[in-house]
Image (cartoon, grey):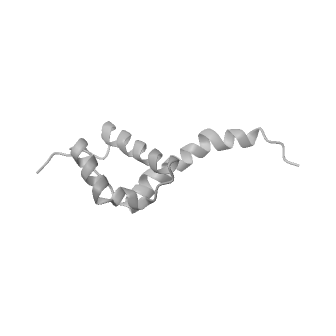
Amino acid sequence: MKETFKKDNVQQKDFLQSLGLLIMKKNLPLQFVESIWFKCLILHLFLKVVLYYRKHFFQEILLNLVEKTKQLYVLPKLTNCILP
């Protein structure tokens, strides 16, 4: 059995954050993370990475990224707006 990263491993977290940003920025469908060709590529390049199903990926990664993006970029812009 191959050794994989633990959920709290820094490299695992960085990979998932990068994958989440790719999906968000390029507006890719969530099915992308379940594509057999994508999985083959990732597991070939990064043997220890653990890939999640789209439901878990959405709940754990994308919702967190959306909240961070909102806090970093959207809300600061809104605070400088003058509403009529």
Relative image position of residue 75 (x, y in whole percent): 67, 43
Instruction: Using the image, determine if residue 76 lies above or below residue 37.
Output: above
Residue drawn at (74%, 40%) of the image: 79
View extreme (front): residue: 37
- In the image, is 20 to the left or to the right of 71? left
Q: Where is residue 76 in the image (x, y as percent from the top left)?
A: 68, 38
The reply to whether residue 7 is in sight is: yes
Q: Nearer the viewer, residue 7 or 66?
A: 66
The one of 50 and 33 positioned closer to us in this rendering: 33
Above-or-below relation of 60 to 81? below
The residue located at (60%, 39%) in the rendering is 72
Outermost residue, left side: 1
Q: In this view, does 34 lie above or below 21?
A: below
- Count all numbered tags in the image, as a single digit: 0
Residue 68 screen position, x and y as percent: 54, 44
Measured as percent of width and height from the top left, residue 21 is found at 47, 45
- Residue 37 position by quadrant: bottom left
Residue 46 shows in this picture: no
Q: Which residue is drawn at 60% across and 46% down?
A: 70
Residue at point 26%, 45% (across, down): 49
Nearer to us in this view, 48 or 28: 28
Q: In this view, does 8 lie to the left or right of 26?
A: left
